[in-house]
Structure formats: C-alpha cells, structure tokens
Image: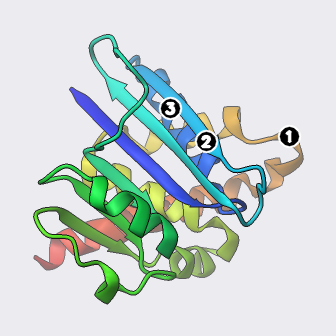
Amino acid sequence: MYFDVIISGFGGQGILFMGNLLAHAAMLEGKNVTYMPAYGPEMRGGAANCTVVVADEEIGSPVIYHPHTAIVMNRPSLYKFGPRLLRGGLLVVNSSLVDPAEVIYKGINLLFVPANDLAREAGDDRLGNMAALGALITKTGVVRLQSLTDALSEVIQKKYRDLLPVNIKCLEKGATYVKNLKSQI
C-alpha cells in the first residue's frame, strides 16, 4: 500500500494539524509515515500546506511534486495544487469556500465536501479541516476513523482538550457525508 496527499489552505484552517493527525493515525496502525509541513512567514491567513506519505514499505522521500491525492481548502490552493495531481488522482475540494464550477481539471476524480458547512452543523465552523479529513479517509480507506479519533487525543494541545468531542463530531460528519454519497450512487 502506498498513499500520498498534499493538504493545502491558508494559515488558521488547521492544515498542518490535519497532516499531523493523519500521520499519527497511520503510525498507530503500524504504517510507515512521513509528514512535511510548509508555511509562509505570514502564518495565519498566509499559505500553508503539508505532505503526508503513508506506506507499508519504507518511504524514499517525503517530497511529492505530483501527488496521487490533494485536499484543497481554498481557491489559491486549488490553483496551485490542482494541476499537479496525477492523472486518475483524487482531488478533495472544500466546496464551502471553492465554487465547484472553478474546478476545471480533467482526468482526475473529484470529491466536493462542504467542509465548513458540515463543521458548522457539528457545532464549530472553524473545524472544516476535520470534516474534510473525515471525508478523505472514508473515501480512500488510508486509515480507519477510529485511528484518527485515537490519535486526536495525542495530537491536540492540552489547552484545546475541551474541543475533542466537537473535533470527533466533525470527523464523523465528513465520514458520514461520503458514506451518504456512496449510498446515493
């Protein structure tokens, strides 16, 4: 098994947290993992992205220029990483902030997730990142939802521990959204 993803958005959307959480969940499952964060000096509001590679075998490099999978949480991320996706790859788009009509790439699989809207329904619209991550793992099966929720208590800062239940609820909202899409097909 080999899986790679670039997760991108703006600072403050929890982009690096998503990658860190995914990496920890994969480690809990005994998989090999690399996690490489990148962000501009402007931090909150500026560009942020990270790369996560999960594999059964050793991983040669954490650098992925043409990913199999990408999550784009805003329009600038769509334009930066959408064209890099490998043919047949999966692009997860936060359709709360990106109009699906703007996604013009051919030869890739698209998953539009209204991540911010799902997070709002779950109780905290700041947690669209968790809804998008729940959708990704349900669509790809890279890790189990239970592994994400188990890793969450290890990764979340102590001062945010009271937000564990709503984070889990947002992960579940994203997972349920994808399950409902599958049942409609």
Which one is nearer the viewer's eye here, 66 or 123? 66
Is residue 30 left or right of 110 when viewed as pictured?
Answer: right
- Distance from Cα at disc 3 to Cα at disc 2: 15 Å
Left or right position of 66 against 149: left
| Image marks 2 and 1: residues in contact by CB distance under 8 Å | no
Mark 2 or mark 1: which is in front?
Answer: 2
Q: Is residue 74 visible?
A: no
In x, y percent, where is residue 58? 32, 10
Q: Quadrant of residue 38?
A: top right
Q: CA distance from mark 1 to mark 3?
A: 19 Å
Is label 1 in a helix, a strand or a loop?
helix
In the rendered image, residue 116, in percent from the top left (x then y), is placed at 56, 77
Packing grade of label 2 (10 A; few <14, some 14-19, many >=20) is few
Can you identify the residue that label 3 sits on?
A: 23
Mark number displayed over residue 158: 1
Residue at 23% from the left image edge and 74% from the top image edge: 181
Local SS, label 2: strand
Circle 3 SS class? helix
Mark closest to the chain's N terminus, 2 or 1: 2
Mark 3, Cα crowd under 10 Å, few <14 / some 14-19 / many 20+, is many
Looking at the rendered image, the quarter that the N terminus falls into is top left
Q: CA distance from mark 2 to mark 1?
A: 23 Å
- Foreground disc of the pair 1, 3: 3
Q: Residue at x 40, y 17 (%)?
A: 30
Above/below status of 92 relative to 19: below
Q: Earlier in the sequence, mark 3 or mark 2?
A: 3
Within 10 Å of the Cα at label 1, are there few (<14), some (14-19), or many (20+) other Cα atoms?
A: few
